Image (spheres, rainbow, N blue to C red):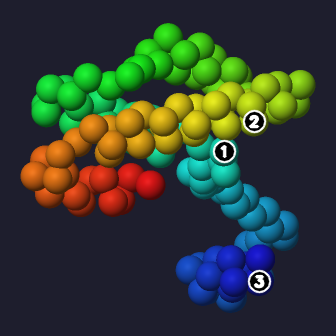
């Protein structure tokens, strides 16, 4: 606050402020930061998307794709800001994480070593 007041004095000059200003009002603007919550579904969605894309490109048939399950789990995660839905949000996040792990391990087990070399960077950075 002192820095803001000092800058306003430096801007107009001390003698002008003493002569003309009887009251000083300083308005500061506070902006929210774009900080993601610790329970974030984006990494899990990214893993699922990459694994499905690799399986499609290499014509690997996954055991399950969990398409409807993922859609159903996104709903409680979307409305998790309310306090009564926190437990539902936590459970849905855990289930989504487990689904991402299952799809990832299914892909890793079925992919051949030659195919794995092409996608080694993506597969090692996802989990």
Residue 123 in the figure: left or right of residue 96: left
**Furthest residue to the right?**
84
Mark 1 / mark 2, whichever is N-terminal: 1
Q: In this figure, which residue is indicated by the disc labeled 3?
A: 2
Q: Residue at point 70% right, 60% down?
A: 28
Q: How far apart are the two marked residues, 3 and 1, measured between alpha carbons?
A: 38 Å
Q: Secondary structure at mark 1?
A: loop
Q: In this figure, which residue is indicated by the disc labeled 2?
A: 90
Q: How far apart are the two marked residues, 1 and 2, measured between alpha carbons?
A: 8 Å
Q: How far apart are the two marked residues, 3 and 2, measured between alpha carbons?
A: 44 Å
Q: Residue at point 39% right, 52% down?
A: 126
Q: Quadrant of the C terminus?
A: bottom left
Q: In this figure, which residue is indicated by the disc labeled 1?
A: 39
Which image quadrant is residue 105 in?
top left
Q: Position of residue 95 (x, y in %)?
A: 64, 31
Residue 45 in the figure: left or right of residue 18: left
Mark 3 / mark 1, whichever is N-terminal: 3
Whether residue 70 can be seen here: yes
Residue 45 in the figure: left or right of residue 122: right
Which image quadrant is residue 52 in?
top left
Mark 3 / mark 2, whichever is N-terminal: 3
Q: Position of residue 2 (x, y in %)?
A: 77, 83
Pointer 3 with pointer 2, Cβ within 8 A:
no
Q: Quadrant of the N terminus?
A: bottom right
Crowding near pointer 2: few (<14 within 10 Å), some, many (20+)? some
Crowding near pointer 3: few (<14 within 10 Å), some, many (20+)? few
Pointer 1 with pointer 2, Cβ within 8 A:
yes
> Which residue is at the front of the view, 40 or 52?
52
Q: Residue at point 50% right, 11% down?
A: 68
């Amino acid at each position: 606050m002192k820095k803001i007041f000092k800058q306003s004095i430096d801007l107009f000059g001390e003698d002008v402020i003493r002569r003309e200003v009887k009251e000083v009002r300083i308005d500061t603007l506070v902006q929210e930061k774009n900080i993601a919550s610790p329970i974030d579904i984006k990494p899990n969605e990214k893993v699922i998307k990459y694994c499905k894309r690799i399986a499609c490109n290499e014509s690997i048939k996954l055991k399950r794709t969990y398409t409807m399950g993922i859609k159903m789990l996104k709903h409680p995660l979307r409305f998790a800001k309310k306090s009564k839905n926190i437990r539902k949000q936590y459970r849905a996040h855990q289930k989504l994480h487990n689904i991402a792990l299952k799809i990832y391990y299914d892909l890793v087990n079925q992919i051949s070593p030659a195919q794995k070399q092409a996608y080694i960077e993506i597969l090692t950075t996802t989990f």
